[in-house]
Image (cartoon, grey):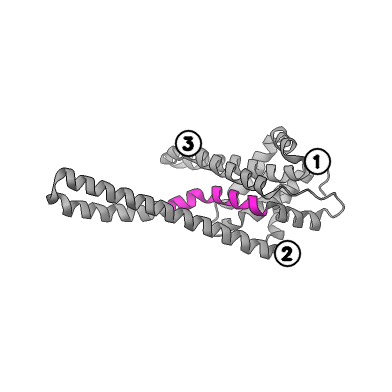
Amino acid sequence: MLEAAIKALTQLFSRPFRTLLMKSVGLAIALLALLTIVLYRLSAWLAEASGAWAEGAIGTFAHAPIVALGWVLAIALGFGLFAGAIFLMPAVTALVASFFADEIAALVEREHYPADAPGVALSLPRAVFEGVRVALLAVAVYLCAAPFLLFAGIGAVIFFLATAYVLGREYFELVAMRFRGVPQGKAFRRFHRTSAFIGGLFIAAFVSIPILNLATPLFGTAFMVHLYKRLTGTGR
């Protein structure tokens, strides 16, 4: 698998990948910005509503303490939104991958496996459906893993393993479905679940690197193409 990771990294910033890299990064940033705005608006509304309720219940003499508390909450909200953006990055990149996985995989196949029959692209609605499904799964898994972050080292390990599971599953299936169709592609992933998970560890490590993790859809897809080819005996 190390060889597959090296091949994916080598191709990541090659000329054919640059256009896809820009589109992928641009969409990831746009989605993160949108999510941040939505979370900010929701949090601001909740803070305003709770402040008005508290002032009405306690009385106008509580106005100054409530304003001070509002400033504290605003600062905490800023840090929370930053942490939330990091927390949501794997889910966002998984969603972005559903838009570009076939283009990325096609470039990898053309350069490294020109003699093999090319994969068949998923329809855009199906690809987006898979991306949304996995993004929601990622959020659910992370919410379950988040409480363990309170336990320092073990929490970080659990969160990392959860990320590896989600991303390994997502990228492996997107590649396998190109060659086997949806039902058989998912079944192939289940049969090779251990390899998919180990591959997910590489992608989880990549997505944990700030800034560079915006390119996760390219690295993850390219990496899984090489892994799939090796598992099917067609990889060099």
Q: Nearer the viewer, residue 200 or 136?
A: 136
Q: CA distance from mark 3 to mark 1?
A: 34 Å
Q: Amino acid at mark 3?
A: Cys
Which stretch appears magenta? 83-100
Q: In the image, residue 171 lies at what x, y percent? A: 66, 46
Question: Cβ–Cβ below 8 Å for labels 2 and 1?
Answer: no
Residue in the foreground of this view, choosing between 151 and 224 = 224
Other residues around mark 3 within 10 Å, as few (<14) / some (14–19) / many (≥20): few
Circle 2 is placed at which residue position? 16
Q: Spot the residue most to the right.
A: 115
Which residue occupies 73% across, 36% down?
Answer: 188
Horizontal side of residue 54 vs 183, given as left or right: left
Give the mark nearest the N terminus, 3 or 2: 2
Q: Residue furthest bottom?
A: 15
- Residue 99 falls within the magenta-colored stretch: yes
Give the distance between the C-alpha atoms of the residues marked 2 and 1, in whole angstroms. 26 Å
Look at mark 1 in the image and give the residue it sits on.
232
Q: Amino acid at mark 1?
A: Thr
Please say whether residue 70 is one of the residues in the magenta stretch.
Answer: no
Q: Quadrant of residue 79?
A: bottom left
Three-letter code, disc 2: Pro
* Mark 2 or mark 1, earlier in chain: 2
- Residue 182: percent from the left, percent from the top? 72, 39
Residue 144 - label = 3
Counting other residues with Cα less than 10 Å from the Cα at mark 2, is it few (<14), some (14-19), or many (20 or more)?
some
The span from disc 3 to disc 2 (Cα, nearest Å) is 39 Å
